[in-house]
Amino acid sequence: MSKITAFFTELMRRYLPDPFVFAIMLTLLTMALAFGVENRPINDVVQDWGKGFWSLLAFTTQMAVILVMGYVLAAAPIVDRFLDRIASHVHTPRQAIIVATIVGCVGSYLNWGFGLVIGGIMARKLALKVKGVHYPLIIAAAYTGFTMYSLGFSATIPVLISTKGHAFEGTMGLIPLTQTIFSAPILLTSLAVLIALPLLNATMHPKKGEPVVELDPATVADAKPASAEQLLGDEKTLAYRLNNSRLLSLLIGLCGMAYVAMHFIKGGNLDLNMINFFILFLGVLLLGTPMKYVEKVNEGVKTIGGIVLQFPFYAGIMAIMHGSGLVESIAHVFVSVSTADTLPLWGLVSSFVINFFAPSGGGHWVLQGPFMINAATTLGASQAQTAMSVMLGNGWNDLVQPFWILPALALSKLKLKDIMGYTVVSMLLVGAIYATTMLVWPHL
């Protein structure tokens, strides 16, 4: 295992550029493919790109909000104390790697934005506490848990196709969650990943005598922001009392929770806006005062700069793929060799490839979904299994797609090349598990 890990780590160190540079290169590659493969006139390609560049601003904002709110929840005192309690029982580097992976997995299964952040926070706590932990590996291990979001409560595609009125309801109908993320095969897949991934990550830790990069405590101390008390000012003023009012946070937080309850009592759907609304006001309640909440939001904003910058580039890439027909061509290569039993497997693989260009579950489904739905109808394959194949391909590729690693890099202050070698190894294991599920599921 150490030789495999060393190979991929060195490969990433030598050849992997910064995530923003990767996005630029991917944009140029997509343009070249649209022109060279699909014969799309170059002026049309550039226009597709420019028109699509700002097409996902609302979605970008939703992604940014869910990540910042996820950070706030993960940094709330009650969660922080819970993580400290867990860390107090960890004493060896390999135990630390396992725990960081599990926290990342469970957090992402509950909510992808929460999981992206809480895994990194747990990893940093353990790196500070446990002597001898290889810091790049523990950050990578926590991030690999992000793949569990494709199996969990915030899996975009299953949640979307279970919602009445979704864009493809006319062609595929409503698919209940009991046929997707809560089906027996997917629940067993979740358990398999939860067991196998932490163990694999632990085996990648450097052996005794091999070089280890530990976290410098001074780095964390220097980055510590001003406390809420420092920001509040003179406690004798009315402004101080309002800023530090627990009553205000309690009242507005309860109003938010009341709205969420009424929304679902009236049969409302669980969408991104409702998820963001819920975690925003839950954070207000958990932080206790308005200014403490603001403090944590300010910290969280620092983790999303790369995503805000790069999301328009990926929106432009998706527009090129849609306008040129590249998505259909990629999917057709795999669908053309599929049967009803193998379509989920090839859907998984094609989704893995497409996710390099469209690293967003919702946007990805808009591009690939129509073709896969039609293929499932033509071949007589399960629509639920086909949709999950696209979702799992998305979550599988996220292990090596630089876009979603950005919050982990911001939290850890590491470079992409420091951790990607480890996530490549994890990607191989997760791919084997997902492929097995897609091969076996149609026969059950």
Image (tube, rainbow, N blue to C red):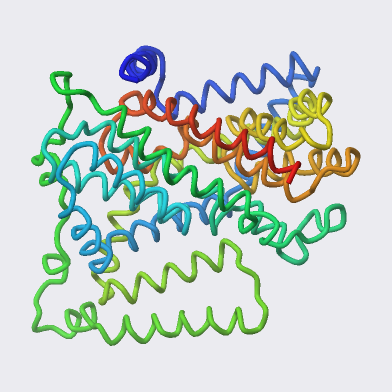
Residue 442: x percent and y percent?
A: 75, 42
Q: Nearer the viewer, residue 444 or 268?
A: 444
Residue 117 placement (x, y as % from top left): 35, 50
Outermost residue, front direction? Answer: 444
Indicate left or right for 177 with 376 as reference.
Answer: left
Q: Residue at x 66, y 83 (%)?
A: 266
Give left or right: position of 369 versus 140. Answer: right
Above or below residue 352? Residue 381 is below
Residue 420 visible within the image: yes
* Tally of marks: 0
- Residue at left offset 44%, top offset 46%: 194
Occupied quadrant, residue 330: top right
Could you tell whether 216 is left or right of 381 in the image? left
Quarter of the image that includes the N terminus:
top left
Q: In the rendering, at what x and y percent does residue 157 appear?
A: 66, 51
Between 97 and 174, the one nearer to me in the picture? 97
Q: Is residue 42 above or below residue 165?
A: above
The residue that appears at 45% across and 24% down in the rendered structure is: 21
